């Protein structure tokens, strides 16, 4: 798995010590192997010390125009996610991911019960009716995470300290190589991350006509 | 078989024509049919291929539908996501059963393979790699998978939840029943052939074992996919079972014989048609040939009759066609040939000059006359008439006048002998056949003929005197057959000519004499060679000096059958045949050789040899004599050559010339038989002779005949006056010898001394004579 990871996490320590709590700032720029910015990449800084999160925040995974919104959602472990349905058709949201296996049978609006994600991992969401609907929920064991914008930029703020850096992306096969980072308060850390092991983006929609098979 | 050759030709031609036409039409039809049928078969194969593709496609669609349903099943997704192998396997079995798929598989995201058929699953190595790859990229895929020598159609779909969590596939095995079904639908032979990139392998199909092997061989040598190819009378098309690869080919085939089968009935009909036409042509040929050969055969028969000399066969002409024309031509030809033959026959039997029947008619006429004469008890008289002076007329006047004379004479004789048949025998000879009871009336008629020629003929304004000789012979008195009658009449004519008789009747024995002469003539040379002819010598004694001897060589012929042949008889014969010169040379040679013998015996003697008139006409005789004398070393004065007076009558100059040459050799020449021929004293004076021999007819009775005494005495005087020595022949008594001696005759020869003796005896006689003289 390491072999696939050729990218390098260059850490230029620049930790800005903020008042107790969040004080260090980390700026990440994620690109693919061709140097194009990679949106929807998720970065998480997992502290060395495992923390039991008791509070249960709520996140939203909306469904609009037969799409999950957002396509990529990062949440802290032990977060409950609501699946409102903003469409006028019903959806049947499900996940067979080991991190969270659930099923919200056909429903409208806000009728679905929120789902608690109590295990870290990747949860792939689908709709049993609409095959094209896909969303990814990354459940991480930290409160310090963010999703890259359209330019592939991620901004993170965390208290100074040593963290395990986790990078996720729907097209990424396998895990991002383990690496650690030490943040301090004094400066902002600027990092460029190249993700290499990306599977090709789905360009064409799945063909439905069988005759093409032959 | 000349009668049938035309029929055969016609038959061959017509039937041949029909057969050729039928063959051409058969071949043409065959070609068209073959082309059409092949095209049909090609189209059939292509549509069969199309159908196969459609069937395969339908199956793919069935599979795809089924797999799609399976992969979209939430429960199945659940099972896959949770790796619930038992559930997965049961779902695969369940869904496979729905579409009667032979096998269903699932490949989990971790590569684990779950199959509806466990044994199938165990055999899988990497057969699905290609399909997997395709399915991962496109979500769905189709391929032909070969597992353990079995071929499958597999359709694979990805299982999405919603990302790909596995790949599910279902497959139909391509089995024998598919080919059977395809055959049922298309009527084509169907074979499935697997290709592993190198080798072709027969999977299943409707072909028999042998055809399978052949097919594989064919595929191996020539890869013709998608196009129609033909081998071993099989029209074939190889269609890939999948677009993706050529692992499996469906080979559709139809035997040429099968597609041609419906047309074989047409072939039979064509053949029957040809047969019927051939028979019709045969019948037509028969009729045609009959219509030609029958009249031709009739005409051929007539032609054969014409060849046989019959010119009156009736020819019934009915048809107006070319054959009728031919028949009419035959009629006119038959008439023309008949007429011409008559003409030719007439011409061949008639003399063109006189218009009289010619010698070809002699025997028919004679036979006719003879047969007619018998019942009438009459005799047949045959007259051979020739113009005595015709050569003279021809020579002195002209050939034309000669011809005119012949014409006149012929006509004149015919006018006189109206009751007989007059023919022209040749040159100036005519022949008349008369019948009468009495010889006298015929003699009168002969006289009448002579009388008629007393007055000269008037020819081209010339008066030509003609005299004729008539020879007569009578049947049955003189001859018993036509041939002998003719010969004897001719003999009579010759006899008459010799004896200056105008009319000469045949006399008994002439013919026999004539035949004997012929026989002698034929026998002469063989007798000479066989030694039946020999020389005898008769002494010639000088009356003054008895020891001066001479001899005359005389020829004697003793024939083994005919006995002694008199020289008077045969000399005449061989003179007339010209053989005398052969005899003379033989005599000269023998006599000179004998002279040599005598001289060797120390006998002083001369020898006389008789020469004939013909010998004097041969120019090389002197040279021959000279050569003989020289080769035998005999002095020329010992040789005497005797000639008769008459011998010099013909071609006197030539004879004289040769005589002088002989005398110049030193040979002594004598005149023999003096007194019997006609010779003039002037001629005698010219001759280079030295001796004169008086004929024995004057000597034999010399002692009793005063006339002979006168003649002999004056002849001796004459001889002496001319400077010749005189010899008397035929001295047979002392009295005569005494008389001759008193006349002054020089030498004597005769029986008084000796008859002619053979050589040996002659020598003995000489010795004896000389001995007596000296004693």
Image (spheres, rainbow, N blue to C red):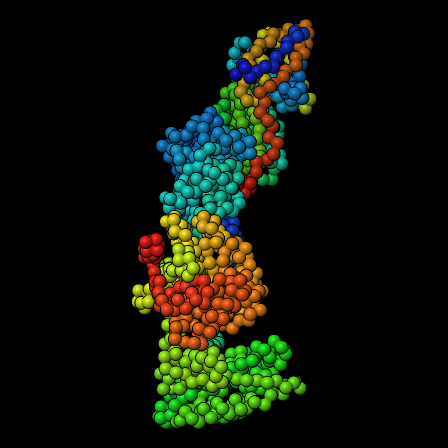
* Residue B252 visible in image: no
The quadrant in which residue A30 appears is top right
| On screen, residue B106 above or below B472 | above
| Residue A198 vertical placement versus B525 (above, below) | above
- In the foreground, A99 or B29: B29
Q: Nearer the viewer, residue B286 or B450?
A: B450
State the residue at coordinates (55%, 57%): B661
For the point 49% across and 40% down, the residue is: B222
Q: Residue B726 at x, y = what percent?
A: 47, 64
Residue A70 at x, y percent in the picture: 62, 28
- Front-lying residue, B182 or B230: B230
Residue at 46 percent of width and 44 percent of height: B251
Quadrant the N terminus of chain B occupies: bottom left
Is the residue B97 above or below the residue B763 in the image? above
For residue B223, say whether it is visible: yes
Direction front: furthest residue: B742
Residue found 40% across the figure and 37% down from its top:
B150
- Residue B764 vertical placement versus B726 (above, below): above
Please name whichever residue, B716 or A201, is drawn nearer the observer in this view of the structure. B716
State the count of labels: 0
Q: Residue B771: where, in percent of width, then height?
A: 33, 53
Give how far across and how far down residue B499 sits, in percent.
47, 80
**Which quarter of the rendered picture does the C terminus of chain B lie within?**
bottom left
| Residue A125 image-quadrant placement | top right
């Amino acid at each position: 798995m390491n072999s696939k990871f050729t990218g390098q996490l260059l850490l230029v320590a620049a930790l800005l010590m903020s008042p107790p709590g969040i004080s260090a700032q980390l700026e990440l720029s994620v690109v693919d192997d061709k140097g194009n910015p990679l949106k929807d990449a998720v970065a998480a800084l997992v502290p060395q010390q495992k923390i039991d999160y008791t509070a249960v925040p709520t996140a939203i995974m909306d469904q609009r125009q037969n799409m999950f919104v957002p396509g990529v959602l990062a949440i802290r472990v032990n977060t409950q996610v609501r699946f409102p349905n903003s469409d006028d058709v019903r959806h049947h949201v499900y996940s067979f991911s080991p991190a969270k296996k659930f099923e919200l049978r056909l429903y409208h609006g806000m009728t679905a019960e929120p789902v608690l994600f109590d295990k870290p991992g990747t949860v792939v969401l689908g709709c049993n009716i609409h095959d094209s609907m896909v969303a990814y929920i990354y459940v991480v064991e930290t409160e310090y995470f963010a999703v890259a914008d359209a330019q592939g930029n991620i901004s993170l703020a965390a208290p100074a300290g040593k963290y395990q850096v986790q990078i996720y992306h729907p097209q990424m096969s396998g895990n991002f190589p383990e690496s650690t980072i030490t943040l301090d308060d004094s400066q902002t850390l600027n990092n460029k991350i190249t993700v290499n092991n990306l599977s090709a983006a789905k360009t064409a929609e799945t063909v439905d006509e069988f005759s093409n098979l032959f | 078989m000349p009668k049938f050759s035309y029929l055969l030709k016609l038959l061959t031609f017509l039937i041949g024509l029909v057969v050729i036409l039928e063959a051409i039409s058969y071949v043409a039809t065959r070609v068209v049919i073959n082309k059409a049928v092949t095209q049909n078969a090609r189209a059939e194969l292509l549509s069969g291929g199309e159908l196969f593709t459609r069937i395969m496609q339908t199956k793919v669609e069935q599979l795809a539908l089924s797999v799609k349903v399976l992969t979209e099943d939430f429960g199945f997704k659940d099972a896959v996501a949770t790796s619930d192998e038992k559930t997965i396997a049961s779902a695969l079995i369940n869904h496979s059963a729905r579409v009667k798929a032979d096998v269903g598989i699932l490949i989990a995201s971790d590569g684990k393979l779950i199959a509806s058929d466990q044994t199938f699953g165990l055999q899988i190595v990497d057969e699905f790699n290609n399909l997997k790859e395709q399915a991962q990229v496109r979500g769905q895929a189709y391929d032909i998978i070969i597992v353990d020598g079995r071929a499958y159609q597999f359709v694979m779909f990805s299982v999405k939840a919603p990302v790909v969590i596995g790949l599910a596939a279902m497959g139909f095995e391509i089995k024998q029943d598919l080919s059977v079904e395809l055959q049922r639908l298309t009527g084509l032979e169907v074979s499935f052939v697997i290709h592993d990139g190198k080798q072709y392998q027969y999977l299943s199909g409707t072909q028999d074992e042998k055809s399978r092997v052949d097919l594989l061989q064919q595929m191996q040598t020539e890869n013709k996919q998608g196009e129609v190819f033909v081998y071993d009378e099989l029209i074939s098309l190889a269609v890939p079972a999948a677009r993706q690869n050529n692992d499996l080919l469906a080979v559709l085939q139809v035997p040429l014989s099968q597609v041609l089968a419906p047309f074989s009935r047409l072939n039979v009909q064509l053949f029957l048609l040809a047969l019927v036409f051939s028979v019709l042509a045969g019948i037509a040929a028969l009729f045609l040939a009959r219509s030609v050969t029958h009249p031709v055969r009739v005409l051929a028969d007539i032609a054969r009759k014409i060849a046989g000399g019959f010119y009156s066969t009736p020819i019934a002409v009915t048809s107006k066609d070319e054959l009728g024309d031919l028949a009419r031509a035959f009629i006119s030809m038959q008439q023309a040939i008949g007429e011409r033959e008559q003409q030719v026959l007439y011409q061949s039997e008639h003399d063109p000059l006189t218009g009289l029947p010619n010698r070809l008619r002699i025997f028919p006429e004679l036979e006719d006359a003879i047969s007619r004469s018998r019942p009438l008890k009459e005799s047949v008289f045959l007259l051979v008439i020739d113009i005595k002076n015709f050569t003279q007329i021809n020579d002195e006047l002209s050939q034309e006048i000669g011809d005119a004379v012949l014409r006149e004479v012929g006509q004149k004789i015919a006018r006189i002998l109206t009751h007989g048949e007059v023919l022209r025998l040749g040159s100036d000879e005519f022949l008349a056949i008369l019948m009468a009871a009495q010889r006298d009336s015929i003699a009168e008629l002969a006289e009448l003929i002579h009388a008629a020629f007393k007055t000269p003929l008037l020819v081209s304004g010339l008066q030509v005197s003609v005299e004729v000789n008539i020879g007569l012979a009578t049947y049955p008195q003189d001859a018993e057959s036509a041939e002998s009658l003719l010969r004897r009449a001719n003999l009579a004519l010759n006899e008459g000519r010799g004896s200056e008789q105008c009319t000469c009747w045949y006399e008994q024995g002439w013919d026999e004499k004539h035949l004997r002469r012929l026989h002698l003539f034929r026998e002469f040379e063989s007798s000479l060679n066989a030694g039946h002819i020999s020389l005898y010598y008769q002494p010639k004694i000088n009356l003054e000096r008895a020891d001066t001897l001479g001899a005359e060589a005389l020829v004697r012929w003793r024939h083994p059958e005919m006995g002694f042949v008199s020289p008077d008889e045969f000399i005449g014969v061989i003179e007339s045949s010209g053989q005398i010169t052969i005899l003379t040379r033989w005599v000269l040679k023998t006599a000179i050789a004998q002279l040599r013998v005598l001289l060797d015996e120390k006998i002083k003697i001369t020898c006389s040899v008789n020469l004939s008139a013909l010998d004097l006409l041969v120019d090389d005789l002197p040279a021959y004599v000279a050569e003989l004398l020289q080769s035998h070393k005999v002095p020329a004065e010992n040789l005497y050559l005797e000639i008769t007076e008459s011998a010099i009558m013909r071609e006197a100059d030539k004879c004289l010339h040769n005589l002088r040459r002989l005398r110049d050799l030193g040979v002594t020449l004598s005149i023999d038989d003096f007194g019997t021929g006609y010779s003039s004293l002037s001629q005698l004076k010219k001759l280079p002779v030295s001796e004169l021999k008086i004929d024995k007819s004057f000597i034999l009775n010399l002692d009793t005949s005063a006339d002979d005494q006168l003649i002999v005495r004056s002849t001796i005087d004459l001889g002496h006056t001319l400077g010749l020595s005189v010899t008397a022949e035929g001295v047979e008594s002392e009295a005569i010898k005494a008389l001759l001696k008193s006349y002054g005759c020089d030498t004597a020869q005769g029986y008084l001394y000796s008859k002619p003796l053979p050589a040996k005896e002659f020598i003995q006689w000489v010795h004896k004579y000389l001995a007596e003289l000296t004693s």
